[in-house]
Image: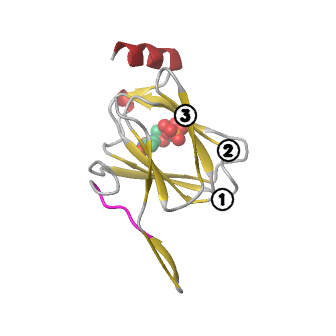
Amino acid sequence: MESPMIIQLPKFLDDRGNLSFIEEKKQVPFKIERTYWIYDVPGGEHRGGHAYLNLQEFVVALSGSFDVVLHDGTKEMRFSLNRSYYGLFVPKMMWREIENFSTNSLALILADGKYNEQDYIRDFDTFVSHAHAE
Ligand code: TYD
């Protein structure tokens, strides 16, 4: 099983401001098939509450901050994202919640597959059974 990992992104700083970038199979260890973003999250709300059987993702706090809480079926790990030059690689088979969104936060998510509801596990106990069977 692969582990989640914070990856530092390239950063070009000059008097005009900052620039960072992501190239597939370089900063992210997969081919990017889909990009989506989460924004305008009301205070106190959380997102996620599911795992993917096969999908891998890479999460960047492009603006503001939030916590990505991952569970591998045995233990929980919390990653606070608050800089646009860090990303979190999320391997497949990780229960995922995103919470503590700051005002105006913007979560960019890169994924290695198209949206596929069949790939979701939306029940935590089912996820834990799957994780322990692997
Ligand atoms: P959902 O998985 O509940 O979002 P989150 O993981 O942030 O809690 O997705 C919300 C809705 O958006 C759901 O009806 C499915 C749809 N959706 C797509 O159509 N395409 C996508 O790429 C994503 C991520 C979601």
- Label 1: how many Cα within 10 Å (few below 14, some 14–19, many 20+): some
Residue sticking out furthest to the right: 43
Magenta segment boundaries in residue numbering: 20-24
Q: Which residue is mark 2?
A: 100
Residue drawn at (73%, 47%) of the image: 43
Type of amino acid under label 1: Asn
Residue 22 lies in magenta, yes or no?
yes
For the residue labelled by badge 1, is the local secondary structure a helix, a strand or a loop? Answer: loop
Rounded to the nearest whole Å, what is the CA distance between mark 1 and mark 2? 12 Å
The kind of secondary structure the magenta stretch mainly shows is loop
Foreground residue among 118 and 56: 56
Horizontal side, residue 134 vs residue 109: left or right:
left
Closer to the N terminus: mark 2 or mark 3? 3
Type of amino acid under label 3: Met
Residue drawn at (66%, 59%) of the image: 104
- Give percent across and percent down for residue 51: 45, 29
Of the 4 image quadrants, the one containing the N terminus is top left
Q: Which residue is mark 1?
A: 104
> Is residue 82 depicted above or below 69 in this figure?
below
Q: Nearer the viewer, mark 2 or mark 3?
A: 3
Q: Which residue is mark 3?
A: 77
Type of amino acid under label 2: Asn
Of the 4 image quadrants, the one containing the C terminus is top left
Residue sticking out furthest to the bottom: 15
Q: Is mark 3 within 8 Å of ligand 1?
A: no
